[in-house]
Each structure stands twice: as structure tokens, then as C-alpha cells.
Image: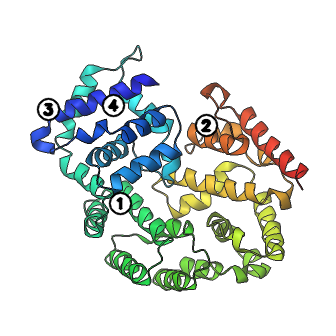
């Protein structure tokens, strides 16, 4: 794994030498111990802590951290719906495939070509870096610029980042201001309906009635789907089983679970939710079908759909006490691995989540996944 570090540092050194005039990249911060430690940990496969450290440094104005994050985003096709999953071996593998020779060693010409291409990306790289700026005007401008120039993968990630931040805001003036900004983007069609539906599903409203009302108001600007979804945002409505059973497919309820609202429910509501989810699972025998509701919401972002599928799996996992149905019997692992949603990182993360252990790639098999989840289910049962 260490050659990845050398490869990235070589690339950044090359940028600082050959593109300094056009890109104005300052790398003096790269020697900062916190940044170097975060890089080392990241390369060793520890995703969460180093990423948080990089984000902290970036948001505190460290140019090297901001530009490093900008380059990491640029190396993969689609920024992930869940950035903690995205910063993993997934982008390392992509980087390696693009910039290594047949013997698996760094390809100097490929790296040189990449450095040359950066000269044509300076404006976009700057915008990506601005996305991490603590300056509200800067990061809003970057968000809008992505959408205006058609960089949908970056734009939708930026929008999700804003929704995620919104869910933790305390100051009502900030909440109102952010909602107003996002609403304007939606009103001028820079945020497509079927993009923010999925993002709204990830909001953690956490019992804040003001946020809930603001989000409902925002949802009402969209189509019938969102009006139904705004009803489901109220956990008290979950007691109405007819609302769930009358849906042709359990899409709305799956998204309800994806939003994490099971934690806000009473015990009786959880039981009702469990029954409904068990019914939904019986209609969905494999992971590809679990993903289809998400695909319909976000058809142009298959990796985002994979992350959404993971969210649904995680919701199922959290309710396994009430279900008693092993997750391994729900997922057709072989079909999942061959499907367009397949992502080894997703499987590894689920296995780590289930066992608390890091797994090497040789263990990323359907048997490992099934065993890991089954073990967790047994452990939960024993702790009852």
C-alpha cells in the first residue's frame, strides 16, 4: 500500500513544479504532521478518522488538504452518496488502474499525462476546493457553478453535503438561509426533482419541528411523490399500516427506513414498522431489486444507488431483532457481485460493520458476507 503514498506525493510534487503558474497550487502544508498522519492512515485502509482529519484541515483553510481532497474527488467517476465509504480502497484501485503499468508499478508517462491534464482542470479544481471552504459565499458559489456547467456528479454531491450540514444546524437564521438558497436552485431547475428526493431521504431531522416544517414546505414544491413522502416524514403516521400497505411497492417505506427514523419510533411503532419491512423484504428477494426503487429516484448515479441500497441493508440490519430473518437469505450474493451495483468496498464495509474486523480482499466473498452478518444476528439474539 505504501507505493500509493509515493505515487500521490510524486504526482503532487510534479504538479507543483510543472503547473505552478497555471494552477497556483501551494503544497507547503503537505508537511504538516496531522495531514501526513491522516494520509498514512488513509493509505493503510483506515477510512473514517483520517478523512475527518483531512476535512477538518481543509475546512480550517489548509490549502494542501483542500487541494488533496479536490484531487481525490477528481480521480473517480462519481463522488459517493456516503463520503466515508467513498474514501476507501475504491478510489485507490481506480488510481492504480489508471496510473500503473502492466507490472503493477507506477507509470511515469501516465502520471505525466495526468499532470498535464490538470492544467486544463484548474478552474474546476479550484471549485472543488471551494466546496470545502468555511466561507459560505465561496462554497455556495462552487455548488452553483458545478450545476451550471453540468458537472452533475460533483454538483449533486455538493448539494447532499449541504443537506447533511443542514440537518445539524442549530441557528434558525442559518437554516432559513440555506433552505432559501437550495429552493432557489430548485426553482431555476438546477436541482432536478429526482436528485433531491434521495438526498432528502438522508436527512436526520432529529425531532426538530422547525426543520421538519421547513423540509415539508420544500417538499411541497415538488410532485406527488414528495407530497406522499412528506407525510411519511412524520413518525406518528407510521402507525397507519394502510398508508404503507396501499402502496403498490414498498418504495416509500424503504426510504423512510433509509432516513433513519426507526430510532424515533416507539416500541409499538417499531413493531408495526418491522411487520411492514418484513412484508417488503418478502417482495424483494435480492439486492438488485432492493436497489431498484433507488434507481428510479436516481437513475443516472448507479454508485449512489449502491450506497442507498447499503442504507436499506443497514436499516434492515438495525431492525433484525424484530425480524429474525438472516440478511444472508435476502441477498443473492453472486448476482450482486456480478451486477452493475457491485462494489467490493460496500461488501467490505458491511462485513466490517458486522464483525468489527478489517478484512483483506481474499475474504471479500459471498460466504464471508453471509457468515459475518449471520454471526452478528446470532450475537444480537444471545444478547436479548
Quick one: label 2 or label 4, which is nearer the N terminus? 4
Q: What mark, if any, has residue 338 been given in the picture?
A: 2
Q: CA distance from mark 1 to mark 3?
A: 29 Å
Q: Is residue 131 left or right of residue 337?
A: left
Q: Residue at x 81, y 41 (%)?
A: 375
Quick one: label 4 or label 3, which is nearer the N terminus? 4
Density class for disc 4 (Cα within 10 Å; few <14, some 14-19, many ≥20) is: some
Task: Compare residues 352 and 75 and report the one nearer the observer.
Answer: 352
Label 1 sits on residue: 155
Q: CA distance from mark 1 to mark 2?
A: 29 Å
Tag 4, which secondary structure?
helix
Q: CA distance from mark 2 to mark 4?
A: 31 Å
Which quarter of the figure has residue 24? top left
Quick one: label 1 or label 3, which is nearer the N terminus? 3
Residue contact between numbered discs 3 and 2, judged by CB atoms under 8 Å: no
Mark 1, mark 3: which one is toward the viewer? 3
Tag 3, which secondary structure?
helix
Residue contact between numbered discs 1 and 3, judged by CB atoms under 8 Å: no
Label 4 sits on residue: 8
Label 3 sits on residue: 18
Task: Compare residues 248 and 160 and report the one nearer the observer.
Answer: 160
Amino acid at each position: 500500500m505504501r507505493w500509493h503514498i509515493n505515487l500521490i506525493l510524486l504526482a503532487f510534487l510534479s504538479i507543483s513544479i510543472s503547473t505552478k503558474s497555471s494552477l497556483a497550487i501551494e503544497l507547503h502544508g503537505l508537511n504538516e504532521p496531522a495531514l501526513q498522519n491522516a494520509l498514512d492512515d488513509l493509505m493503510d485502509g483506515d477510512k473514517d478518522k483520517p478523512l475527518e482529519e483531512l476535512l477538518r484541515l481543509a475546512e480550517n483553510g489548509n490549502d494542501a488538504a483542500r487541494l488533496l481532497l479536490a484531487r481525490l474527488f477528481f480521480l473517480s467517476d462519481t463522488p459517493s452518496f456516503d463520503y466515508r465509504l467513498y474514501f476507501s480502497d475504491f478510489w485507490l484501485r481506480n488510481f492504480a488502474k489508471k496510473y500503473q503499468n502492466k507490472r503493477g508499478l507506477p507509470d511515469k508517462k501516465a502520471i505525466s499525462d495526468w499532470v498535464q491534464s490538470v492544467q486544463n482542470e484548474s478552474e474546476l479544481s479550484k471549485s472543488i476546493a471551494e466546496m470545502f471552504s468555511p466561507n459560505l459565499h465561496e462554497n455556495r458559489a462552487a455548488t452553483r457553478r458545478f450545476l451550471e456547467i453540468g458537472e452533475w456528479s460533483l454538483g449533486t454531491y455538493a448539494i447532499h453535503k449541504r443537506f447533511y450540514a443542514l440537518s445539524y444546524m442549530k441557528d434558525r437564521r442559518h437554516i432559513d438561509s440555506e433552505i432559501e438558497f437550495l429552493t432557489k436552485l430548485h426553482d431555476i431547475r438546477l436541482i432536478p426533482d429526482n436528485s433531491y428526493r434521495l438526498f432528502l431521504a438522508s436527512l436526520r431531522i432529529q425531532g426538530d419541528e422547525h426543520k421538519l416544517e421547513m423540509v415539508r414546505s420544500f417538499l411541497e414544491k415538488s410532485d406527488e411523490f414528495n407530497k406522499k413522502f412528506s407525510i411519511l416524514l412524520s413518525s406518528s403516521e407510521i402507525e397507519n399500516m394502510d398508508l404503507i400497505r396501499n402502496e403498490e411497492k414498498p418504495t416509500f417505506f424503504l426510504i423512510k427506513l433509509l432516513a433513519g427514523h426507526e430510532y424515533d419510533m416507539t416500541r409499538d411503532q417499531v413493531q408495526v414498522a418491522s411487520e411492514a419491512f418484513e412484508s417488503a423484504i418478502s417482495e424483494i428477494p435480492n439486492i438488485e431489486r432492493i436497489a431498484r426503487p433507488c434507481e428510479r429516484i436516481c437513475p443516472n448515479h448507479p454508485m449512489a444507488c449502491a450506497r442507498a441500497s447499503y442504507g436499506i441493508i443497514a436499516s434492515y440490519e438495525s431492525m433484525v431483532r424484530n425480524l429474525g430473518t438472516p440478511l444472508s437469505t435476502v441477498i443473492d450474493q453472486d448476482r450482486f457481485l456480478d451486477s452493475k451495483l457491485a462494489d467490493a468496498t460496500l461488501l467490505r464495509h458491511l462485513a466490517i460493520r458486522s464483525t468489527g474486523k478489517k478484512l483483506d480482499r481474499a475474504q471479500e466473498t459471498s460466504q464471508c458476507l453471509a457468515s459475518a452478518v449471520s454471526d452478528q444476528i446470532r450475537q444480537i439474539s444471545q444478547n436479548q
